[in-house]
Image (cartoon, coloured by chain):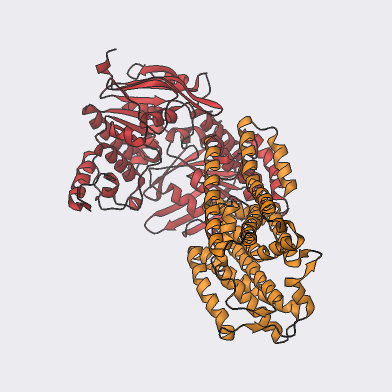
Amino acid sequence: MTGTAERLRMSGIVKRFPGTVALDGVELTVRPGEVHCLLGENGAGKSTLMKILAGSYRPDEGTILLDGEPFSPVTPHAGLAAGIAVIYQELDLLPDLTVAQNLLLGRSPRYGPFVRRSRRAGLAREALDRVGARFPVTTPVRELPIAAQQLTAIAKALTADARVIVMDEPSATLGESELLAVFDVIRSLTAEGRSVIFISHRMDEVMEIGDRATVLRDGRTVGVYDLTSTGPGELVAAMIGEAKELVRPSGHRAPEGEPLLRVDRVHLPGLLDVRDLEVRRGEIVGLAGLGGAGRTTLLRALFGDLKAHVTARLDGRPLRVGSPAAAVRAGLALVPESRKEHGLMLGLSVGRNAAIAALGRPPWLLPGRAGRRLTQPALADLGVKCAGPDQLVGQLSGGNQQKIVLAKWITRGGIRLLLLDEPTRGLDVGAKADLYRQVRHLADQGVAVLLASSELNELTANTDQIQVLYEGRNVARFDPRDSLESVIAHTVITGAMP
Amino acid sequence: MTTSTGSAMTVAGKDSGGARSRRRMDLIVKSNLLLVFLALCVVATLLAPQFLTGRNIANLLQQSALTGIVAIGMTMVVLTAGIDLSVGSVAAFGGMTVALLMGSGVPVVAAILLSIAAGALFGGFMGGLSAYLSLPSFMTTLAGLTAIRGLTYLLTDGKPADVGGAPEAFQLLGGGFVGYVPIIGIVFVVITILAALVLRGTTFGEYVYAVGSNKEAARLSGLPVRAVITAVFAVSGALAALAGVLLTSRLTVGQPTAFSGLELDAIAAVVLGGTNLFGGRGGVFGTFVAVLLLSVLRNLCNLLGLGSFFQMVVTGLILLVALILNMLIERRGARA
């Protein structure tokens, strides 16, 4: 291969952390104008590799060539200046500043010490137009929906005239239609000769947008694949390295009996109006919908976290939840959307996190020791991988962290209705299957489950009933055993059956 | 405390090497302060022979006990990521009310309990405002600092309040000794141990750490977050009032001007003791050692004849060095 045909070549990259080798001789080449997918299970080394490219980490060994020139960024600023723009999953925007301020942060046009506000607004407008965004540049980022924030982050990457744009799981926070808009932007970027490195767990996206893919496993490059001639099955096999069941087929059987949860109406003016929803004991009901369709709002309303008008019966008795504490007493449990912000106390140990919800019951003394004993069964059942109950929960992988959130409720016991909000976000294939196995196990013990997810294939594979929410209303109900996924997807996007 | 650390260490035995070295690091961080404290005591003994006399040690304990008692309450507040700026005013108020109550013939025990209850009420009110209306505790207690100090002056129009014919038992509380050990020193130690038991050995203590570590996650776990916050402020107020009572007992007069700036001394001890200002990490034993350390430092300066201005500079620098050290060690731990 000649040097000019390569935009980026990272070769022999080694990065060691105390106790582990994160990258052990990784190779990555990216051509101009290509969408290059970077695949691998969580912990395979994707993020570390991208942090080296961005200049956040320095490699212990290896070389980087950017357009044939040696490149060794020492700070993120140097990486950006050389034309490497990284859009992280947790968007690095400043929420209280306006879109224009964010887009030109540190690079605002100036007269001496004064900012040329109208010029800045003009530049910001141009940048937004390029990604097809129509919201005003004077909006504070905090007030934008998450998809618009994503577009802002992409636009920001473009203002730096980036040669290589890295997108770290942009789809994790986007709904289907928003994702299509982002794909359009990616296509126009590559048409200009820019290179995009696209990190995603979703095979359908990878197949749709990617030209080639590099698969990492355990800090090594497994292979480079041309996506026109490679199927998703082969990629997944390369990622996981052994023949592992992708999604465990759950022997769907419709649970019988009276519904445990009977929702007549959950109403929040302008946001949510869900009627007639039932969940039986042992049943997993999936909530499908675009981002902003009301899945999270419905779960939070049921959990007493939002002041909504809830008319529902739990086990035949009126459900009255004024607060999460009351909901917990009534036997509800929530696995929230963002485990780091809402699910876990990252600075505390595994044992203390897992025990915290159970402590509301006697014994009141020595919760540390009692907690350690109480949490053992749940942690063992869930197969949590950690050094011990004293390890900080912030040091665990995403899958294990999510298990701790679940362990918190299992340890408490007495769950009747389990609410899960995007429980598999950011988890790798194995961890997802593991999580669904645990949820099914709980359902088999008689728990009623309401599970919201953006991953339709996960819902069809793991639930007993799918409710589609559209603009705050539940518009359709599917039985995953005899429904076509394409039909459900159409309903999710349009709000009506085809 | 020693037993609970011990059990944590045995569990660590089967951990991986990384976790073990981290825990060893934690231990160094924890004992770091103790080592510095002991080193300082050695230096003090060498520089000033009279440092290690019974009279001086007793003096030292007596000086640090009141700030220490308040700092223990402050530690609990800071563990929930709050701050209590009103402790100085509440302490002064407690000292005045106990004097006035006893002066007007209320029995000793009732007067003390009423004063402490008043402190708890003030604390609970400010903490409750902060918890239920989502106001920053910095602001509610700043308001309290001013308003309660004003209230204290209003009680006697700014004049000291005479205890009157206080029974000897009351005077012993603040000024008495058991052998060489001042009674208020014993009170300080007992309160520290009680607070440690509550924090490490009860559900409430576990909730304090949970709320400080992540309030949102604690709330969504069904914890009574607002009640916990209100309670730690009530405890802080009660302990501040107790400090006021003890001072009045020692001076046999209530001083409305007492304890100004106490909140800063207490916060300094909490921070020096390794409790994180953003909540969730730390404990009362660090605070206990830090209080003694600051007191020894002051004592040493006195013995060496260095003025209070010099002491202030040294205290500030020690705080800064301690913070930087903690930060460096923590950063090292985070990378491992």
Query: Residue B278's x, y, as percent?
Result: 52, 53
Total residue callouts: 0
Q: Is residue B164 above or below residue A18?
A: below
Q: Does residue B246 show up?
A: yes
Q: Kindly tell me whether residue A387 is visible in this rendering.
A: no
Name the image quarter holding residue B156: bottom right
Residue B20 drawn above or below residue A234: below
**Chain identifier, red in the render:** A
At 48% across and 66% down in the image, what residue appears? B139
In the picture, the quarter occupied by the C terminus of chain A is top left
Whole-percent x, y for residue A292 in the image: 38, 47
Q: Is residue B145 left or right of residue A101?
A: right
Where does residue A487 sit, x and y in percent of width and height?
A: 37, 35
User: What tint does the image give chain B?
Assistant: orange
Q: Quadrant of the N terminus of chain A?
A: top left
Q: Nearer the viewer, residue A435 or B173?
A: B173
Q: Nearer the viewer, residue A334 or B24?
A: B24
Q: Say which of B226 and A17 sits in front.
A: A17
Pick whichever, A64 or A2, lies toward us: A64
Q: Residue furthest top?
A: A1
**Vertical position of residue A225 compared to residue A379: above or below:** above
Q: Position of residue B115 (x, y in %)?
A: 66, 76
Taking A171 as reference, is A42 left or right?
A: right
